[in-house]
Image (tube, rainbow, N blue to C red):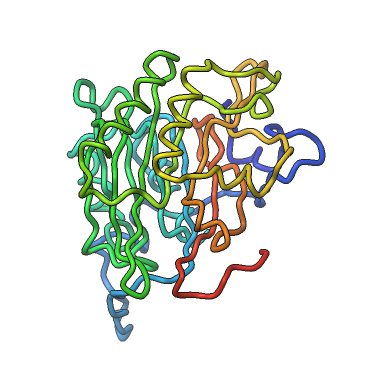
Amino acid sequence: MSIGLQEVGKVSHSEKGSSCTLSGNMNYPGKQGEGTSDNSTQQKGQRAKPKKKWTRAGITITSLNIKGYGQSGQNSKWMHINQIMHDKKIAVLSVQETHMDEDRKDKIEHLFGQRLKILASADAESPTQRAGVAIVLNKSFLNVGTAMTKEIVPGWAMWVQLDWNGGDTLMILVVYAPNAPTENASSWGKITDYFVNHPRIKRPNVMMGDLNMVEDAIDRYSMHMDNRTQVQVLNNLKADLHLVDGWRDAHPGTKCYTFQQLNGSSKSRIDRIYIKQNMKVKSDNWRMEHSGIVNTDHWMVLAKISNGRGPAIGKG
């Protein structure tokens, strides 16, 4: 479903009484590159802010399928992404369907490199036409200089390691799974095999993205189970990595959806964030929100996570 910026207040992805969260009107202003470009100049007499080389203990992580690269200009998707990450204080954004090759990535970083660092993986055959995943890092909250990446399935699965507060590391797996059931199941098997065959690669603390399938009937409208093979192979991966569905764990029994077919006949919660079992007590504020970005048909999913160096996160 494509929802315009003026339609943010419509609760169309959830059933009445659900815990889906919507923010207010997201009419993001700003001219291209305004206040964020690498080559922007400081106003006379204004002292430049020192670069931050630390990472906060508690950070907001988010995932969003943006449905393609979009057009350039002041209403571009990446203009809005830059603004969203600022306004919502998002530290890490996992993006799917980026359709972004190296040239496109460089152009975005030229515009927004003062705030954002982009780590991307493009589809090997059609980098600007299909798939593509990326991790967008907010320099206001993270030390991005030491970030490391590994392509697991180019354009579909990528591993990222970040330095976290107190000398810890945060490993994130961003995924965009194929839609076809057979290919979808195969993708989870490939990821499982990758970690088995690369034992020195640290297992992810977080897996997030567009999985293009659900594990339980409650996550589809009308309710029905997905292909058993898909579910089983994903469950095997989750078991190997000790991952749990954070939103479902926080909202058992709640019906809420992140994607809707154009004709409105089908809804599903295919966009999810998984975290390590032992991180649950250090996570909170699991929610779904419309991004306000035009020409997207997914809602973004968000959570706040912390490591063991800070206090346990309370409700909020």
Q: Quadrant of the N terminus?
A: top right
Residue 284 location, x and y as percent? Answer: 60, 59
Q: Is residue 25 left or right of residue 182?
A: right
Q: Residue at x 35, y 20 (%)?
A: 186
Q: Residue at x 26, y 31 (%)?
A: 153
316 relative to 3, above or below: below
Q: Quadrant of the C terminus?
A: bottom right
42 relative to 256, above or below: below
Q: Residue at x 25, y 35 (%)?
A: 194
Q: Residue at x 33, y 83 (%)?
A: 46
Residue 267 location, x and y as percent? Answer: 64, 24
- Relative to the observer, which residue lies in front, 178 or 13? 178
- Relative to the observer, which residue lies in front, 106 or 212? 212
Number of numbered callouts drawn: 0
Q: Residue furthest right?
A: 17
112 relative to 184, above or below: below
Quadrant position of residue 187: top left
Residue 57 location, x and y as percent? Answer: 44, 71
Residue 240 location, x and y as percent? Answer: 40, 40
Q: Is residue 216 left or right of residue 16?
A: left
- Relative to the observer, which residue lies in front, 217 or 35? 217
Quadrant position of residue 47: bottom left
Q: Is residue 131 left or right of residue 302?
A: left
